[in-house]
Amino acid sequence: MTDADATLAATPPMGWNSWNAHSCAVTEDDIRAAADALVETGLRDAGYEYVVVDDCWMADETDDAGRLVADSEDFPSGMAALADYVHDRGLQFGLYSSAGSHTCQGYPATLGRERLHAEQFADWGVDFLKYDNCGDHCGRDAVDRYGAMGEALAAVDRDIVYSICEWGQSNPWEWGRNVGGHCWRVTDDAVATWHTVDDEFGLGIADIIDRVAVLDIAAAHGPGGYNDPDMLQVGNGPDSAQSQHEPTDIERPLSDVENRTHFAFWCLLGAPLFVGTDLTGLSQDLLDLLTNERLLAIDQDPLGLQGTPDRRDPTREVWSKRLADGAAVALWNRGEEQAEIRTHVDETSVPTAGERYSVLDCWTGEQWESFGELSATVEPRDTAVFRVTPT
Ligand code: GLA
């Protein structure tokens, strides 16, 4: 490992990804508009730095040598020019391929051509690779396929964050870091709803939290390598392109409280934060949510730990995440009626050396002192989040 590797993804990567907003209809104009919007809205300055083009950027065929070619209608300027555009705005550029013969949408992908494509990506100025799990695996297991790309990326003369998108099928938290990954998806795709039912595509936001709660994977999570519960669906609903593209039946956009709980939990989990909504029409409320400094500080805490559940029941849940100076505590009302949720620092990850604690409400910014009791009245599906620091 070089020094550069040690600082790459020292905290969970943050940015914007095209898939949830634009799905397979993505064009270079969408990417430019997203880059501009990241700057204009202040999202870039809040830390969202990677602009990632997901599936469907490629032409139907590779060139004769097997290199990927940008689709000439949707990406006429080519990927190097698009990377320049993104870099010129103080942002980083990301691309997508798959550890199989084809991408999930049937475009040519990388398996067996890792070195060639890694060199191409480096030449184009790619800073982040999302590497999916679709196509023919040619009989090779996940560690072998993802390891081949990890080696190829390590061999090029450019720092490229390596985002493993293997959906948690072969326990990537056990090997993701060792193959050079900086994050690894731990579940199926998130969709823009609270719950999905059995035969529907993907997982709702509450389903993903439930899945992470039982996986027992927090030990794998830390600086340089993170469990990834998938990109944000904050701001999305039935009209978002992914919702329309996939076989899902989404009836309404995520509500305000669902968006809050979604974002709060991704920060508590220390997740990579990839906004997946169309930034050109972002409301002020959603912008305020995505740039909440108190929540982002929890996500980006230098210890890089993952939050874990302390208590779960059908209506009230308590989760916490150890931070460099204390802990974040989340009180989630998963029921359908307002609830008073109480806990004590003894039950959570808060270091309990002292007697008094400073408590910061991460939604309101209000601050008070406590002898260890923590409580909140929480609306249905909402989550109270406190930063608790021994004084
Ligand atoms: C898979 C991935 C998604 C997205 C699509 C693109 O479903 O899990 O995140 O990249 O492929 O086709």
Image (cartoon, grey):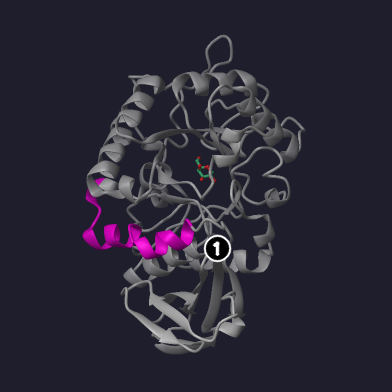
Q: Quadrant of the N terminus?
A: top right
Residue at the spot of label 1: 208
State whether residue 27 appears in this view.
yes
Q: Main secondary structure of the magenta part?
A: helix
Q: In this rendering, would 32 be left or right of 158?
A: left
Q: Which residue does the image show at 57% across and 23% down from the upper left? A: 118
Q: Tell me if residue 152 comes above or below residue 44 in the rendering.
A: above
Q: Tell me if residue 195 comes above or below residue 344 in the rendering.
A: above
Between 366 and 34, the residue placed more toward the observer is 366
Q: Which residue does the image show at 65% across and 27% down from the upper left? A: 111
- Mark 1, secondary structure of its residue: helix
Percent across and percent down for residue 355 are 54, 86
Q: Which residue range is magenta in the image?
A: 280-300
Image-quadrant location for residue 208:
bottom right
Q: Which residue does the image show at 51% across and 52% down from the upper left? A: 230
Determine if the magenta segment contains residue 223: no
Q: In this rendering, would 369 be left or right of 302?
A: left
Determine if the magenta segment contains residue 293: yes
Percent across and percent down for residue 72 are 37, 19
Distance from mark 1 CB to nearest ligand 1 atom below 8 Å: no
